[in-house]
Image (cartoon, grey):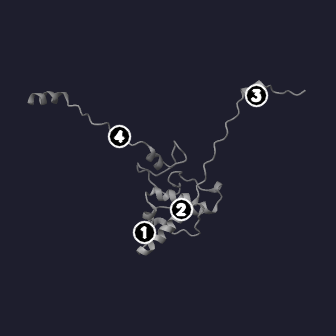
Amino acid sequence: MRSVPSLLSMLDHPAAPPPAPLPAPVMPWDYIRMRRLAAGLSIEQAARPFWHRPEHQADVERNMRAIEAVGFRVKRLWDMSRSFRLNLTVYRQLCDSPPEQHPRLCRACGWDEWSSQLDVEGFDCTWSAADPEICTLCEQARRPKFRPRPANTQPHHHTGGAAQRAA
């Protein structure tokens, strides 16, 4: 005869929580946008170093918008270092490799561990200990800024009497 567990014994063992969903992979167009935004540039500002005549401005800006369009991949991406830092090897990996083989990138700025970048404190950037999805630069940028306490507007006890005596 087989032993069958009772219903009560099954209730004592709660089911394991479902696994956390994996974050969506960073795609090539996301990477370009994250690096541009990390540099603090608009599309117009990022395009400016690439056009020399005013009649070329619209074409260059259209191309810059295109490389950030969802689903767009460039076979030969031009050197973007004139306007912002971008690792072309990482871009190629994002274009050519399946998502499970993508390099690890900061989810906020697109930094990769092979690129040099300094954090706010002047140290080499690394992965955040508090949130392993972002770099230390982005972690420091998220911290609340130091706000000094408001200045004491009350007169000092030794000046209050002098002001009253002078009046």
The picture places residue 112, in percent across and down from the top left corner, at: 53, 55
Q: Residues within 10 Å of mark 3 (few under 14, many from 20)?
A: few
Sequence order check: which comes first, mark 3 or mark 2? 3
Q: Secondary structure at mark 2?
A: loop
**Amino acid type, mark 2:** Glu
Q: Secondary structure at mark 1?
A: helix
Q: Tags 4 and 2 in contact by the CB under 8 Å rule?
A: no
Q: Is residue 59 above or below residue 109?
A: below
**Amino acid type, mark 3:** Met
**Amino acid type, mark 4:** Arg
Q: Which callout, 4 or 2, points to the residue nearer the camera?
A: 2
Q: Is residue 122 left or right of residue 133?
A: left
Q: Tags 3 and 2 in contact by the CB under 8 Å rule?
A: no
Q: Residues within 10 Å of mark 1 (few under 14, many from 20)?
A: some
Sequence order check: which comes first, mark 1 or mark 3? 3
Q: Residues within 10 Å of mark 4 (few under 14, many from 20)?
A: few
The picture places residue 134, in percent across and down from the top left corner, at: 52, 48
Q: Which residue is mark 1?
A: 49
Q: Quadrant of the C terminus?
A: top left
What residue is drawn where x is 47% and y is 57%?
37
Sequence order check: which comes first, mark 3 or mark 4? 3
Sequence order check: which comes first, mark 1 or mark 4? 1
Q: Which residue is mark 2?
A: 68
What residue is drawn where x is 20% and y is 30%?
156
Q: Which residue is mark 4?
A: 147
**Amino acid type, mark 1:** Pro
Q: Secondary structure at mark 3?
A: helix
User: Could you give the CA–CA distance between mark 1 and mark 3, rounded to whole angstroms?
Assistant: 67 Å
**Residue 84 got which mark?**
none
Q: Tags 3 and 4 in contact by the CB under 8 Å rule?
A: no
Q: Which residue is mark 3?
A: 10
